[in-house]
Image: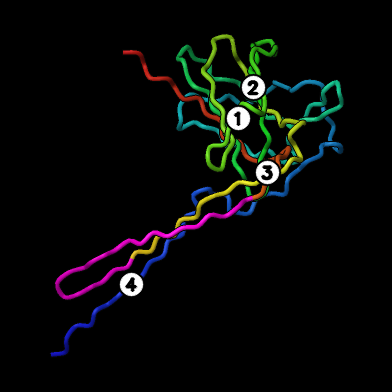
Amino acid sequence: MRNPERLFAALTIVVLVSGCGAQGPAPIVSLADRACTPAPSLLGVQTLLLGDNNKMDVAVDASAPCIQAPDGSRSAYVAMALPATSVPYVLSVRSTILGQTVFAPRMELLDGDGHVVRDMPRSAFMFHGASLYAAVRSHADERFLVVFSDAGTVGQTKSQVHEEINQQTFTSVTPTAVVSVNVNTGNDHTVAFTYADNGRLTIAATPLPAAE
């Protein structure tokens, strides 16, 4: 009887930890051709719902509205109503790198009359992997969130080093056993991107754990 042959299989999985390798939109760094208003419009804005399952992914593109400040600078923006709830929550805003583009965020929290209650400058957003991220605890008097592109940052470029992990699984099949061995290798690569008036935002209102 012919002896069974030993079979070998190799599976290679490449994981881009940063998620930045994908193609993205070209960065928009000028809003000179748009009709901007002096203040953001809050009419008919979508309401952010409470809970991680209700997070909102917003594509900020060439159709986004914009404001023009008294100094002439312009910013694209996304506005939404905050959850109508007495439950305290954490409001988080994430701007994800898309190819060579990242929306340059700053944000304002407004009361029911549209007056600014709190603002967070671009410097309040810190890099968490492939995203700029900021989070604040809710205040009872805040009714609206507006995330603007930061006119002072738009057009600037930045480079980051990201890790690429390659995992190879080698499997040996014999008449008596199946043996698998994982081999991990990796390397670093540099990603260059531009702060822009367009990009992608992920916004969530996560309830705080109830006090015991």
Above or below: residue 185 compared with residue 57: below
Q: Earlier in the sequence, mark 3 or mark 1?
A: 1
- Mark 1 crowd level (few <14, some 14–19, many ≥20, 10 Å Cα): many
Exactly how many numbered labels are in the figure? 4
User: Which label was assigned to residue 125?
Assistant: 1
Residue range (magenta): 170-191
Residue 65 is at least partly visible in this image:
no
Q: Is residue 69 shown left or right of residue 203?
A: right
Kindly report the distance in space between the C-alpha atoms of the residues bearing marks 3 and 1: 15 Å
Spatial CA distance of label 3 from label 2 is: 21 Å
User: From mark 4 to mark 3, how far is it between C-alphas?
Assistant: 41 Å
Taking the image as shown, residue 36 lies to the left or right of residue 156, namely right
What residue is rendered at 62% in x and 40% in y?
200
Residue at x 51% of width, y 32% of height? 55
Q: CA distance from mark 2 to mark 4?
A: 53 Å
Q: Amino acid at mark 3?
A: Lys
